[in-house]
Amino acid sequence: MTWVPTTAAEREEMLAVIGVTTVDDLFATIPESLRPKSWNLPAPESEMAVRRAMAGLSARNAVCHTSFLGGGFYDHFIPAAVDALATRSEFYTAYTPYQPESSQGTLQAIYEYQSAVCRLTGMEFANASLYDGGTAVFEAATMSVRLTRRRRIVCHESLNPLYGRMLKTHTANLGFEFATGDDPADAACVIVQNPSFLGSVADFSALAGRCHEAGALLVVSFYPLSLGMLKTPGEMGADIAVAEGQSLGLPLGFGGPYLGVMATRKEHLRKMPGRIGAATEDAQGRRGFVLTLQAREQHIRREKAMSNICSNEALCALRALIYLCLLGKEGLREVAAQCHARAEYLKSRLSFLQVLNAGPTFNEFAVRLPRDAEQVVSALAERGFLAGLPLAAVGAGEATDLLIAVTEKRTRHELGAFAEALKEAACS
Amino acid sequence: MQLIFEKSRPGRRAAQFDALDVPEASLPPALCRAEPAELPEVSELDVVRHFTQLSQQNFGVDSNFYPLGSCTMKYNPKLAEAVAAYPGFSELHPHLSTCPAFRGLCQGALELVYETEQALAEIAGMRKVSLQPIAGAHGELTGALLMAAYHRDKGNAKDTMLVPDSAHGTNPASAAIAGFKVVQVASAADGTIRLDAVKEALNESVAGLMLTCPNTHGLFEPRVREIADLLHESDALLYYDGANLNAIMGHARPGDLGFDVMHFNLHKTFGTPHGMGGPGSGPVGVGERLEAFLPGPRVVCEGGRYDLETPAKSIGKVAAFFGNFLIAVRACAYIRHLGGPGLKEASENAVLNANYVFARLKGTYQPAFESGFMHECVFSAAPQAKAGVRALDIAKALLDYGLHAPTVYFPLTVRESLMIEPTETESKDTLDAFCDAMIEIAGKAESDPDSLHAAPRTMPVGRLDEVRAARQLDCSC
């Protein structure tokens, strides 16, 4: 079969060395009574046939529309060099750097990624990655519980409702108490998001102060790309900063793989979950990189570990690092400024609609339409636009509310055409 | 090698964007960062050369034999990479599944989720599968949450999870996060779980047992059906850790063995890349007892149209959408290409290769167990360690042969363990080269142990000072 190289002659030689006559003899420890009751799987298909079938499935998905769909996941430009480098198989066919000497590429990339995250967020320590934005919020909550020995988790209204649901699923049996709002009294943490799920920008510095007075932690879920412009979690006094890293050069990919970003302050480091890379030296004084503080992790601590995480999203973290290097200091500032400016322009063209955000927004905002949002997005999809996310679908608004996101990819012409089309679909 | 930050020069740039063709906009200064993030200022070639050189400091399956036990480092087919890059998959926005108005725009992706879940269910003899869990450990946690939900629903006061001493560390860690107390169950001298130890540990408070099969000693658990029956008698559940599913495809199915819930590791069994430590994918499969509790929403098919539905007693969401979708795309291509016969043949050759390595090395290294290895074999370097050469030294010596080391110091039940999993995609020539190297290293352990203590010599760095790394904590620049 295709990926098995062993010839019939070799198989015979190998069986002779093993001292059995057939491959089936090697399965003798599985009793006959436990053999499969069914094995109703398709026949093999050639590579050509598989590609044809998968191309057929791929073609039945809409990726050519002009997109204003966000809701935590954004259609940003990805420079070609990101794909060219992250698809090098020396990276993607390696595993966890258990042998550091033969994994220096991986380990240096982890160290550089952690450095980039710290510089981006203004935090002191970052881990090597978690699964995604939602599980990063969950890990931040359990980390806060470990640090404060309290069990009350306060979720601010700004938090992505999907993250809130994931948090409750993951912690269902841990006896946590949940509240909404921003009261830090007796709380392990208050979890906020900036920009909010509806796109509003805030400064949570004062809340950080109130949290710390009350002995609670402030967890800030941030939008990495927005930090080209916005006040950082570090500047606000956050204890733990977490993010969905998809905006940093990861394709939308219908939901994953994505990247869970986590960073914290030095005093909380030892309670942080996930792998951590560190610089050190060999006997000759050459700089090299290893995984460190592994006594926090499941393979050492088992049921007492900080988390059960083992495989993480290392290749996605590499993509984020490459993206941040390609953009650099000025490029990240520019892309954030462009997203904001283009969104503001669209907002100005939608003056016929009520914007629901009370204050400033970054690149996403919510509007109230004169009619059902699902109907409007259906009509606009036929005209080649993904108009945004109807908020009722995620339980974050009325049936008439629509969340509209704008990235650096949307041109003035597209923004103008969309404004016209939306006016027609919504108001005529 | 220099850090990318050390290559930064003020004013240098790589990526460019379209010129801004709308008015500039600003936010109040109080909402903005004080200084720009100090990211590297480098050219595109600087970045390309830097990361190309970093990649060259790695062992990967494409360049080196990688017999890391329990990790199934098989070849990652290029076909899977090619299809995962199709724009209809890679550029598809996940919120297209969120609202009914958009669902017609992602029918191909929903069909792929549906088809992959169906195929995995048949492979494992499970009723239903959910692709939501993002990695193996996440699948374990999801499985443990399902078990907790089942017992809560039935009013069972069961708060204890049994875990064998040979289990992956993720098993007890996942059980703990799902709210269970963990009780360890001892293995017998032959490397399989002791039935009397399970009986002894089993009481009214036991919610379930987490079992890897074949276990992390590489051995099939012959009493698995009896264990399942025992558990089911007291309404406890049996969890299958799918890390070693690559040993048994087409020869046994967890569902037929009596398991109620399991996770798959698509990055092990189904050839998707390990990506330096991730992304993986850890779909969860369930039998009829747990079907109603699966994460939602789920893809359902009615009259050729794919839609979403949340099971009656769903535990909720463990991922925002359908887990690591692009990994599922790869696994789907893998399953389609091999089909039923190819999957079976993959397992057969994985077992053949491990047994061949075992046969060639059992005269040189001390077998951890006498016989019965399936897709991996475990040795102990305890005799060598007595002479001053530890499993770690053997691992480092292999690197100088251009061979990745086996898993060392796991399973914890075997002293100085060397856990070797060659996988089915390696040729006899490669296995021979590996065995020759292992035998030569064993010779050196007697004749010239110091040469092994000095290994590796040919890597970019020698052995690194891990104590210094932990004490001086330099984790970023």
Image (tube, grey):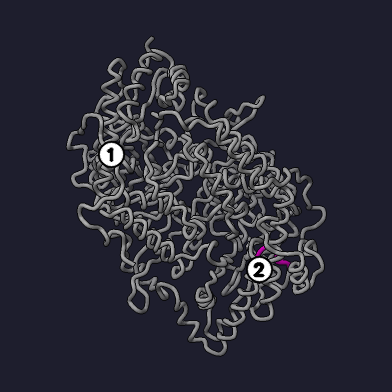
Q: Badge 1: few (under 14), some or many (20 or more) residues near its Cα, within 10 Å?
A: many
Residue placed under numbered mark 2 in the picture: B377
Q: Which residue is at the front of the view, B271 or B21?
A: B21
The subunit carrying tag 1 is: A
Amino acid type, label 2: Cys
The answer to which quarter of the image holds residue A186 is top left
Residue placed under numbered mark 1 in the picture: A336
Residue at (35% x, 15% y) in the render: A423
Question: Does the rendering let one see residue A220?
Answer: no
Q: Which residue is at the front of the view, A246 or A302?
A: A246
Residue at (82% x, 53% y) in the render: A33
| Residue A137: % across, % down | 40, 43
Residue at (41% x, 29% y) in the render: A67
Q: Secondary structure at mark 1?
A: helix
Residue B170, compared with residue A158, is above or below; it is below
Question: Does the rendering let one see residue A67?
Answer: yes
Q: Which residues are magenta?
A: B372-376
Q: Which mark is residue A355?
A: none
Q: Secondary structure at mark 2?
A: strand
Amino acid type, label 1: Ala
